[in-house]
Image (spheres, rainbow, N blue to C red):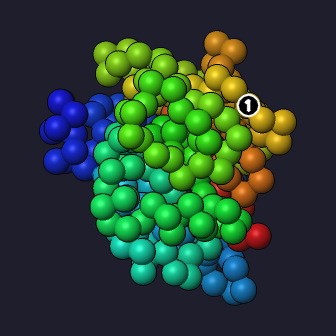
Amino acid sequence: MSEADQEQSGREPGQQAGDEHQSHEGPEQQAGDQQTNGRRPVVGVLAVQGDVREHVAALDACGADPRLVRRPRELGGLDGLVIPGGESTTIDRLCRIFGLHEPIRRLVVEGLPVYGSCAGMIQLADEILDGHPEQQTFGGIDMTVRRNAFGRQVDSFETDLQIAGLPDPDRLFPAVFIRAPWVERLGDEVEVLAAVEGHPVAVRQGHLLATSFHPEVTGDHRVHALFVRLCSG
């Protein structure tokens, strides 16, 4: 699928790569059944482009109340926000067109828990390499990320990862990499949760979580369960 087709579809090319996975019943469901003041945490999913539906399903399975975010007013009352995988330059451009860029930047600074997968990781980086000259990020994580570092669409792959901090940590995570970035520089406050070939691919800095892979296209919801815990305080 071309980048233009991808923008029209709202999905990242090849995201069906995880369709063959079977759902994992286990600690992630219990770990995700978090409540904030007696209610399910309200977690927004930035819905301007990318694999939105898969994140919504994973958050719901983990006990969150997912909400689509397309306009600034829809950012109100959130306990957390997910920036999905897709095409980072498109997400950036549409967020600026729809007036979402600055409100999301403010929420990141103010401490709202935010999780970004693949393109979302790029958008949470303070610095990016191989980006569009005019590309802007929300920032927040003190790291430098290289776009498409693992290669193009044909170089997509899956590998089992040990990811620190997940429920049932002894069970490997089936990580799907699609035109994925990696982290080339980390600040002192950034925690590496997983790496591939020496490159960090899952990181956390306080209330911010990012992965270069796509947990939303698998049936394993433990990354989302970890994020829902962050949103639940």
Res 45 seen here: no
Q: What residue is shown with label 1?
A: 186
Residue that appears at 25% across and 50% down: 10
Q: Quadrant of residue 56?
A: bottom left
Above or below, comparing residue 81 to residue 131 in the picture: below
User: Relative to residue 216, is residue 194 depicted above or below?
Assistant: above
Image: 145 above or below 208: above
Image point 27% across, 34% down: which residue?
Answer: 13
Asked which quadrant contains residue 78, the reply is bottom right
Residue situated in front as seen by the camera: 218 or 105: 105
Nearest the eye: 61 or 11: 11
Is residue 12 shown left or right of residue 30? left
Residue 4 place in picture, x, y as percent: 17, 38
Q: Position of residue 97 (x, y in %)?
A: 30, 61
Q: Is residue 181 left or right of residue 232?
A: left
Q: Say few, some or many: other residues with alpha carbon within 10 Å of mark 1 (under 14 / 14 to 19 / 20 or more).
A: some
State the SS at label 1.
strand
Query: Among all residues in the image, which is located at the extreme right?
Result: 188
Which of the pair 126/223 is nearer the observer?
126
Q: Is residue 203 left or right of residue 181?
A: right
Q: Residue at x 76, y 70 (%)?
A: 233
Examine the rendering and report whether any part of residue 85 can be seen. yes
Residue 232 x/y as whole percent: 71, 70
How many numbered tags mark residues here?
1
* Residue type marked 1: Leu
| Outermost residue toward the front in this view | 134
Check the picture and name the quadrant holding the N terminus. top left
Q: Position of residue 129 (x, y in %)?
A: 51, 26
The residue under the point 57% across, 25% down is 182
